[in-house]
């Protein structure tokens, strides 16, 4: 009996990757998600980045089982011609099914409630120390506690953006607003916008916003060609000022991390004041206003300007530890240029991430980022289970001869500085305006 299915080729599918004509393939079936992209909870960008190709592995990574039942309404009636599943993808999907059967995606534990209680205690301790004590050292310690509070609230914000950390979605949203917008001054809408793009295009120089830190940092000499950011929709100009700053980035890395909070504040405000569509924009703005009411007010109760400045500096510097942690997981890992490819999802996620070796009693310090490989492969998995699944992921990487990158905290710092130093020295070659010899050509090679 002849096959009655209608097929389209990969070449034809690739033509449907525009905002007004957006098709994807999931398990060989073709779906038109053009209209849905405007309502997609993760925003249109992940769909655009994976448009015109197979996106099965990414779909499995980011969606619960219930999402499959909604796909039929977008089915075009076409199937992908010659659709094949690689051995790696097949094993990855089996592993995802096994974890689901074990209930790991649903068992969240009580970590969030405990952490929220600790954050509340830290907050009231800081307020009490500022308002009721007159010792300078107490005020400075309160600044440090505030920074530590922001780190821990950041972990809840991160978790709640990937999966429901509370008993229902409304409480989850409340936890996001409290820990992100109100307590930390960071828009959760901004975070989800950038973080989703990061996960989809992990370590793509032009698609991953978490690697686009010019004019302060570049992790690759490929930035010297002033590449265009697909995320921001503009050219990242490698001008003379950027060359100067990048030339010393291995020295300025830690000082900049101490004030990196300012960038997050600025990016949040810029997004919320822009015309870009942000879900629950009113709530987002209200939360940011709450932060910029209580934090300056608390600082104003300190007795003099010296203590006020030092309180802010200490709180920012302590939070800088978290910004360093963000960088350690990706700065020294493999990078590439171009859009993400759904056919090598597993490989790109493992190549672009670095785990941090630590004992289980230090898991609170890293907030799940110590298992960055596992987190990128299974972003919906509660972080309390990342250590549990680590041996399975490691074994799968070994089976397919893929790197399972990990290093100690100190080694990861050294690797990051070495990456920055390498790019800095190459930037100095350009700064010194040497003739276009073989060294110059090597630095400026495309690809």
Image (cartoon, helix red, strand yellow):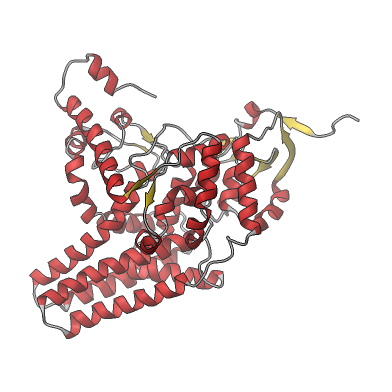
Query: In screen coordinates, is 144 left or right of 195?
Result: left
- Across and down, in percent, residue 75 comes to 72, 44
Query: In screen coordinates, is 220 left or right of 390?
Result: left
Q: Nearer the viewer, residue 239 or 93?
A: 93
The residue shown at (65%, 52%) is 97
- In the picture, the quarter occupied by the C terminus is top left
- Across and down, in percent, residue 54 comes to 62, 37
- Across and down, in percent, residue 86 comes to 63, 34
The residue shown at (24%, 32%) is 422
The residue shown at (88%, 29%) is 2
* Residue 275 visible in this rendered orientation of the protein: no
The single residue placed furthest to the right in the displayed view is 1
- Across and down, in percent, residue 262 comes to 25, 57
Count the numbered circles shown: 0
- In the picture, the quarter occupied by the N terminus is top right
Name the quadrant containing residue 22: top right
The image shows residue 375, relative to residue 161, as above or below, that is: above
The residue shown at (13%, 66%) is 309
* Residue 160 visible in this rendered orientation of the protein: yes
The single residue placed furthest to the top in the displayed view is 437
Q: Nearer the viewer, residue 23 or 350?
A: 350
The single residue placed furthest to the bottom in the displayed view is 132
Q: Nearer the viewer, residue 267 or 337?
A: 337
The image shows residue 156, relative to residue 350, as above or below, that is: below
Q: Nearer the viewer, residue 219 or 196?
A: 219
The image shows residue 321, relative to residue 396, as above or below, that is: below
Name the quadrant containing residue 50: top right
């Amino acid at each position: 009996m002849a096959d009655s299915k209608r097929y389209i080729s990969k070449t034809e599918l690739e033509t449907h990757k525009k905002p007004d004509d957006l098709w994807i393939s999931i398990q060989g079936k073709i779906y038109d998600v053009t209209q849905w992209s405007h309502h997609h909870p993760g925003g249109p960008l992940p769909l655009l980045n994976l448009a015109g190709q197979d996106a099965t592995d990414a779909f499995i990574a980011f969606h619960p089982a219930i999402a499959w039942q909604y796909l039929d309404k977008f089915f075009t009636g076409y199937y992908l011609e010659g659709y094949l599943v690689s051995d790696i993808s097949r094993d990855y999907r089996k592993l995802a099914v096994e974890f689901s059967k074990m209930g790991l995606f649903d068992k969240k534990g009580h970590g969030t409630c405990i952490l929220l209680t600790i954050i509340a205690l830290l907050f009231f301790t800081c307020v009490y120390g500022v308002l009721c004590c007159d010792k300078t050292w107490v005020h400075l310690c309160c600044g440090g506690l505030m920074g530590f509070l922001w780190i821990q609230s950041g972990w809840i914000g991160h978790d709640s953006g990937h999966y429901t950390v509370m008993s229902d979605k409304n409480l989850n949203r409340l936890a996001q607003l409290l820990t992100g917008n109100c307590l930390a001054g960071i828009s959760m809408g901004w975070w989800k916008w950038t973080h989703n793009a990061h996960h989809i295009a992990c370590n793509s120089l032009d698609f991953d916003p978490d690697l686009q830190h010019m004019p302060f940092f570049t992790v690759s000499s490929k930035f010297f060609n002033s590449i265009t950011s697909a995320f921001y929709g503009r050219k990242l100009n490698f001008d003379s000022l950027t060359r100067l700053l990048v030339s010393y980035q291995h020295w300025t890395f830690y000082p900049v991390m101490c004030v990196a909070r300012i960038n997050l504040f600025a990016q949040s405000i810029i997004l919320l004041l822009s015309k870009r569509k942000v879900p629950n924009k009113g709530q987002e703005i209200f939360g940011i206003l709450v932060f910029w009411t209580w934090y300056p007010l608390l600082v104003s109760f300190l007795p003099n300007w010296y203590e006020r400045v030092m309180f802010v500096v200490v709180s920012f510097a302590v939070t800088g530890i978290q910004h360093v942690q963000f960088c350690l997981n990706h700065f020294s890992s493999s990078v590439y240029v171009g859009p993400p490819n759904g056919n090598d999802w597993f490989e790109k996620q493992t190549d672009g991430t670095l785990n941090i070796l630590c004992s289980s009693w230090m898991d609170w310090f890293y907030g799940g980022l110590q298992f960055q490989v596992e987190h990128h492969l299974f972003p919906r998995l509660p972080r309390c289970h990342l250590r549990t699944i680590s041996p399975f992921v490691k074994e799968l990487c070994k089976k397919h001869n893929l790197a399972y990158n990990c290093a100690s905290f100190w080694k990861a710092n050294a690797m990051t500085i070495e990456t920055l130093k390498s790019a800095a020295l190459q930037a100095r070659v350009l700064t010194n305006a040497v003739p276009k010899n073989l060294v110059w050509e090597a630095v400026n090679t495309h690809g």
